[in-house]
Structure formats: structure tokens, C-alpha cells
Amino acid sequence: MESRRERIGNVVTITLVTVLIWIWAAGETREDITSFTDLRLVGQTKGSVQIEPEELNSVSFQMRGPKRAIDAMAARFREPVEIQIGTLGIPADPGVHEIDLLLVGQLLAEQADLPVTFLSADPKAVPIVIKSLVTRSMAVQVILPDGVRTAGGVNVAPSEAAITLPESLANLPDLSIDATVSDQDLANLTPGRLHEIEVMLSLPPSLLEHTEEVTITPRKVVIGIKLVSTESTYLVPSIPVQVAGPPADLDQYLVIIDPAAAFLRDVTLRGPADAIASIADGKVSVIAFLHLTSDDLAQSITEKAVSMWQLPPGVTVSSIGDNTTANPMVPLTIEDRSSQP
């Protein structure tokens, strides 16, 4: 006959086995869930390829399987999943490829040795572009603003930089690495002294459309420069247009400038830094003049080019809007005052 202790032991054993069976059964219960994740595509070696797009965000997977496996797969999807091209059904060859995300998901489960079936993916497939990259070492070219004169050479450190770009762009004409010095970089530098300034490296303006495909290392260089003289530029939002001419004739005629042309917009001025600063600070006014002759007034011309400017010494007009001429035509109306009531 069983003792009381044996009976209690048997009850405990049966209870533990029951609980374990229940836990196992719960873990093996098949479930369907939808899980979201971000996929990040990387090359087999760093800097060897360019992948577009590199990240596939918020990919939705519908999965079926034992609860334990489903939970493990969903836990992995809570963080971005990094996938090396050439694995999990993703090609590594350069070109345009259609990626079957449903297959990628299923292979991820097999890789993790999880008995999960992927039922659907949204999107089901995506196109990617893989480009082979090449890296070249090139001398840095220093580009100074127009009108800047230096004493001696301009030093740049480092003198070379590495450029990484798609193989298809490696033979582009005019390919260079530029350190472009702006007027603002030089604005407060004293001529005659050696200065060091830090400048970002970039492609030349003719190749700016390829900027996003190119990596330049390092990103900045230090330029040593001694100025003999320096000029600055300043963009004036608007400059008034006024009429000039023989006083006696202007008393006889009424000159009306077309309201749409009464101000010249986005005028770029260039000149000595101190003179440009006086304009920027509002200490000096800039005015454009239409100089009308007696014949212009008598003939009631309907337009006239700007021919004079009120500017500090050494300052010139570089451009007006997108126009590089400093003498735009201005529409006007001329009326004889004596004929007016």
C-alpha cells in the first residue's frame, strides 16, 4: 500500500508532467501572424558596390507555424535585418534585379532553422540596382573666387583625396575633386598674412548631378593662403531704377517706368570687401539709372537700357537675376506735359 509521502510524490510528478505537456502544446500550437520589418542590403565587401535602394522599409510578412517559432521569427524582425547580396536569393551581380521578398522571408526562416511558413509578403517583389564601385586617388584642385590674388602658391593638405564612384562614371570627362573657396571664406582675412581655412571637397559644378553616387574621402582639406587683395560678392534683393537726363527736358516730359521694372531683382555686385560690406550694412545706396537724351524724350521711346549705376569705387555689377549683363532694357512711357490737361 502506498504511503502518504508516495501519494504526494506521484501527484506532484503527474502535475509537473501535465504542466510540461501543456507548455509544449502551447508552444507547438500553430498560429498565423503578420510581422513588419526593415531589410538592409549590404555588399560582400565594404565599398565594393552601390545598392539602390539600400533599405526596404516596413516590409510586411504573413507567417504560419508553431507559436514558439513564430515568436522567434517576429522577435528577429523587431530590428532591421541586414542581408548580404549574394545570399538569401538576392543576386550580387551588377545590374537591375527583381527581388522576391516572399522567398527572402522563407530563406530567413530556414537560415534560423525555424519551422515557419511564409504565406505572403507586401510588397511581394521589389526592383534593386547594383552598381560596381571603383576608388581612385586624385589631386585636389583649389578653386578661388574671381578677382582674388595670392602671394605665392596655395597649399592644400592633404593634397590628394580618394573618390569612390560607380564604375560607369569613372571615365567621365572633367572628373576632379575640387576645394572651392567662397567669398565668405575670405571675407575677414587680412591681406599679406598666411591664413589656413577648412574647405569641403566636392565635384565640379558640371558633375553635380552625380553627387549622390560619389563618396570623397576625406570630406575636408586645409588650405594655406596669403592674399594680396580680395574681392567679395553680395546679392542685393532689389535696386531701384531712376531716370536721369537734361533737367530742362525732364521738366517738359513725364517719364513713367513700367511698375514691373521699377526695381531690378537679385543683383550680384562684386568689388573690394570693405566696399561690399558698406553696401551690405546699408551705409551706401545702390541705384540704377536710365539716362535719357533730348532725342529719347522727343521721340517718346518705349524702352531704354540701364546705362549708369551709383556704386562705390571698384564695385561692379556681375549679374542681374539669371542675366549676366549689367545693362537690362527697361520699359517706360514718355508723355509731353504740355499736352496734359
Image (cartoon, rainbow, N blue to C red):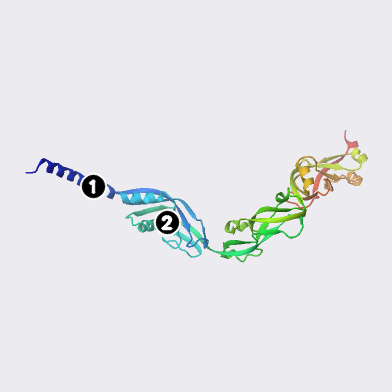
Q: Mark 2 against mark 1, which lies toward the viewer?
A: 1
Looking at marks 2 and 1 on the same chain, the residue that comes earlier in the sequence is marked by 1
Please say if the residues under marks 2 and 1 sit with CB atoms less than 8 Å apart: no
What amino acid type is highlighted by mark number 1?
Answer: Leu
Horizontal and vertical percent position of residue 146? 75, 55
**Measuring 91% from the left and 42% from the top, which residue is drawn there?**
246
Kindly state the secondary structure of the residue where label 1 is placed. Answer: helix
- The span from disc 2 to disc 1 (Cα, nearest Å) is 37 Å
Task: Please give left or right for residue 119 compared with residue 15 in the image.
Answer: right
View extreme (front): residue: 193
Quadrant in which the N terminus appears: top left
Q: In which quarter of the image is residue 104?
A: bottom left
Task: Please give left or right for residue 327 compared with residue 206 in the image.
Answer: right
Q: In this picture, is 278 found above or below 209? A: above
What amino acid type is highlighted by mark number 2?
Answer: Leu
Task: Please give left or right for residue 108 compared with residue 97 in the image.
Answer: left
Horizontal and vertical percent position of residue 95? 51, 64
View extreme (top): residue: 341
Q: In the image shown, does 125 or 54 lie closer to the viewer?
A: 54
Q: Which mark is residue 20?
A: 1
Tag 1: Cα neighbours inside 10 Å, few (<14), some, or many (≥20)?
few
Kindly state the secondary structure of the residue where label 2 is placed. Answer: helix
- The reply to whether residue 319 is in sight is no
Instruction: Please give the residue where the numbered disc 2 appears in the rendered image.
Output: 101
Horizontal and vertical percent position of residue 105? 39, 55
